[in-house]
Amino acid sequence: MDNLYNLILAGLQKSNRAQSLDQNFANYLRSLQTPVKQLRQSYRSDLVTVDYSSEEIQSAYLIAYYPQYAEMTKQVLEQVNYLHNNLFLLEQKHLNICLFGAGAAPEVVGLVSFLSVHYPKLQSLNIRVYDIFADTWAFSQQITRNIIDQLWQGRIEFSTHLVDFCQFDSFKDLKDVISESQLFIFQNCLNEISDFKDFNQNISYLLEIMPSNACLIMADLRIYKKTVKFQDKVKKFIQEIDLELDLLCFRYMENLDFTSELTMPDIIIKNLLTGDSFLIPRKNIKCNFLSIYKAYKYEVITNLLKQSNLLNQSLLSLKNLQEQENYNLKHQIKVLKLGLIATAIVVLLILIFMIFY
């Protein structure tokens, strides 16, 4: 992922929009300064509303925000993987993943970068992106497809679907998909929700339908106070779901600060993110995330009992080994004593023979 900026620029250069301009690529980047400023101003509001239908706006987003959001996904997954003591089986060969409100889907880049390191035995991924503006993001999502082809060596299915997760019962149409998926991510989209009532109902349904040993992650920038409050509400109503469904949801709500490690090409610094007002490159990211790892209580208890049995067996084996070692040691000492006695007798007989003969 180190060369992510270059992969994005290559995607823009190959796009119809960049090729159709009667100017060089540096001038094209300069033309994106106004869209970047528009995004910066829109994202300062606590309720974000942006028209992403313009390719210029999407291009500006790809350069000014996409790289750090991909890093954010990877960083969050690193933390969640540590907190939950591995998200997936190390021998896992295939994963089904749902991304909600992903837009251009920078999460996919962070995801495949994370999986390549921590789960190298994975052979295939099926990633479904759900967004109310699924068709609008086609331009950027094609660039994402080109990028992941460079980063992921296995087989990957990447599809986009139109879903309004603020519409009542909208997740019921996804029942089959949810029930067979292992990871669900909402990242940097909660700040665009005006009414959480129906969204809460959909989240509750998702938690009910998602299979055991699956994980739900909600991550957002900390600058939006309402998203932090919402995550806290989700954490509380999960306790009620625990009681109703006999679940044991392992959950963590953590802050995460990191500095971008990506190297920005000079052509971007000179022509787009120059450091002027509203054109300052993003380096320091402050976000938080809520992770929920679902397991049925009887499964947890069964696993604990299995671990307890394995521990008892290990202790018993260790005890048997120690007893065997003690027996072997005593036997060796006994043999050594007999050997010493036999040696002494032989020496004594030799001395007697020498004296008398």
Image (tube, rainbow, N blue to C red):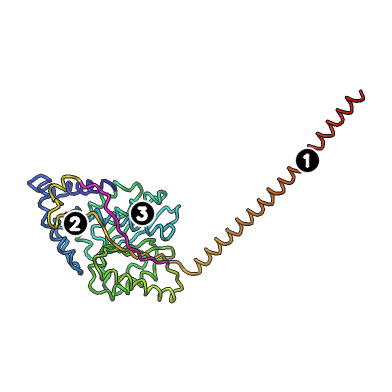
| Towards the viewer: 336 or 304 | 336
Answer with mark 2 or mark 1, whichever residue precedes in sequence. Answer: 2
Residue 122 drawn at (x, y percent): 40, 51
Q: Amino acid at mark 3?
A: Leu
Q: Which mark is residue 185?
A: none
Residue at mark 3: 125
Q: Are marks 1 and 3 in contact (CB under 8 Å)?
A: no
Query: For the magenta stretch, what is the residue range?
Result: 250-264
Magenta span has 14?
no
Residue sitting at 26 percent across and 63 percent down? 221
Looking at the image, residue 171 lies above or below residue 271: below
**How many angstroms separate mark 2 from mark 1 (CA)?**
84 Å
Q: Is residue 46 left or right of residue 328?
A: left
Residue sitting at 12 percent across and 57 percent down? 277
**How many angstroms separate mark 1 from mark 3 (CA)?**
67 Å
The image quadrant where one finds the C terminus is top right
Point out the residue furthest to the top here.
Answer: 357
* Local SS, label 2: helix
Eye-nearest disc, 2 or 1: 1
Residue sitting at 34 percent across and 46 percent down? 153
Residue at mark 2: 61
What is the crowding at mark 2: few (fewer than 14 residues within 10 Å), some, or many (at least 20)? Answer: many
Q: Is residue 195 left or right of residue 292?
A: left
Examine the image and state in which quarter residue 49 appears. bottom left
Eye-nearest disc, 3 or 2: 2
Q: Amino acid at mark 1?
A: Lys
Q: Amino acid at mark 2?
A: Tyr
Eye-nearest disc, 1 or 3: 1
Residue at mark 1: 337
Looking at the image, residue 259 lies above or below residue 188: above
* Local SS, label 1: helix
Magenta span has 251?
yes
